[in-house]
Amino acid sequence: MGKIKVSEDTYLVGVGVSPGISIGEVALIDNRVQIDDSLISPGSVGIEIERFHTAVDRAREQLGEIRSRVAGMPHLEEHLYILDTHLMILDDKMLVDASVSAIRNRLTADAAVKQVMEQLNQQFANIEDEYLRDRRSDIDAVGDRLLRILTGVRERSLSDIPGRSVIVAHDLSPAQTMQLDRELIFGFVTDKGGRTSHTAILARSLDIPAVVGLDSVTALVQERMPVIIDGSSGVVILRPSAATLAEYRRRKLNYESLEQELVAYRNLPARTSDGLEVPLRGNLELESEFELADKHAAAGIGLYRTEFLYLGRQEPPGEEEQFATYCKVLKAMDGQPVTIRTLDIGGDKFVQDLSLEDEPNPAMGLRAIRFSLREETLFRTQLRAILRASVFGRVRLLFPMVCGVSEIRSCKRILQEEREKLDQDGIAYTRNLEIGIMIETPSAVFAAHFLAREVDFFSIGTNDLIQYCLAADRGNEHVAYLYKPLHPAILRAIKMTCDAASAAGIDVCMCGEMAGEPLYTMLLVGLGLNELSMSPACVPRVKRVLRRISRQESDDLVDRLLTLPTSKDVAYQLDRTMRAKLPEIFDQPLI
Ligand code: PEP
Ligand code: MG
């Protein structure tokens, strides 16, 4: 297939998932295979089924080999679960049964695997939760491995990649990512993937800049083509001109010296110039990211998305397993608060098998606390594990997507019943555990005044709040232009929430993506947020801004911004104010 001719300075924009700038040359990894989709004769069905089973066995062997290699590498050991997840997918009865039945319908083994993988992928694509939706990458990785075995296409080994390489791939399997040599690989760029795909998570923990979700970058590049990637802004530049190269070398140096400078913020308090303390906490999805919280001196965990524990497995984690995991986290955070959010998923599919219940409108369906209140046994198990772990650190318990008072009362009733059972069993737990709710829906905002009397804290989830307030699906690219954090309605929703909390004397945290954007720090302080929780890597940048602003000027800024009618007006004013106030931070060219 001929490549499209790429002109000098071709800019592409994807999702920046691991910050930093890399300048290197393309090492193209094309994992895709050609599938034979002709119908087989009834007499060949047995042979194809045999071929399928042999491929599954071989895939298991390959993963086992990679697993034992990686097991000796300390920086990757914590990611072994990814390979275990892949082994589990291979053993999934539904995958095996559906593939065999597709072969019986006269598909070749490769076409059958492809069809079943597409079906699974489709089911995952409808999931509301971004993290879970991104788990499609695990299904793809297993499917691609099986297809390569079936079609005899070998995965390019990453051990022979030359130095200064920026890996460009349709998708990278986590197994491939784990084989990368950090000294030789300068960055990753992929067609597929999202912010929480495993490649993204691994790139962050390997500290390699990465941009994903570029759609068709593999169709544009050639082996050893010069490339620049900016993992912070998501910009990729193919065939950079001499001027662009010079500009990005300068930015790279700036970035690196800023990183150095930011280290100095580690031990400085997170407070405004006039003394208002605003704890900056970390958002975590994986246990392995706790190290990052420590590295960037996050003040504990403001959001622990426990969904991760339930993923890619046949059975939900039991009480003991959850208890052990929560204890590990609490011990690692050494007395700092750990806000454990109960399960936030959209259906019971992950805990029993890989098939999803179809919901016509999953964002408004049985997700988050609605799911937990329906699947009470699962909910009680999680609450019991959290209660038991609470004596090993400072736990704050957070319930997702609560829409009204009766929901939180139901949660508290169930929690109380579990406490009483623990009392009967003579098991210790922290009696005055702080309880909070996520404010993520317009109903929670409007009822904030009542809700604030029921709980010890609020946590605003702007990722969802914005989508529900503006009726704009956070994952739908067709309405992405409507997804505006600075919309006047959003500013008011945040302010109403903070005012209600303040009247009731409770704290408000913000743990949506908005909290990690330094451009918004002054606005958020002015709106009345008491704490901010973000990707740990964002903490030093937000702290740098926080320490330079005062409470009074933040309030003044909010007074001005609240008079503006459109998000564009708000964005313009905010940008102007921040550039004038902190030019060395905000007065940088955008691209
Ligand atoms: C949010 O909605 O802003 C949030 C933090 O929760 P999640 O992204 O997990 O839905
Ligand atoms: Mg949410």
Image (cartoon, rainbow, N blue to C red):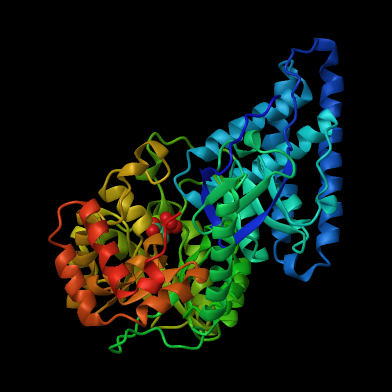
Q: Quadrant of residue 557?
A: bottom left
- Which residue lies at the image location 67% right of the left edge and 29% below the top edge? 3
Q: Position of residue 259 (x, y in %)?
A: 55, 74
Total numbered labels: 0
Residue 445 in the image: above or below residue 540: above
Residue 329 in the image: above or below residue 341: below
Q: Viewer-proximal residue, 578 or 63?
A: 578
Residue lying furthest front in this view? 242
Q: Quadrant of residue 577?
A: bottom left
Residue 467 in the image: above or below residue 256: above
Q: Position of residue 107 (x, y in %)?
A: 73, 18
Q: Position of residue 178 (x, y in %)?
A: 75, 57
Q: Viewer-proximal residue, 340 or 186?
A: 186
Give the quadrant of ligand 2.
bottom left
Q: Position of residue 443 (x, y in %)?
A: 23, 54
Q: Quadrant of residue 333?
A: bottom right
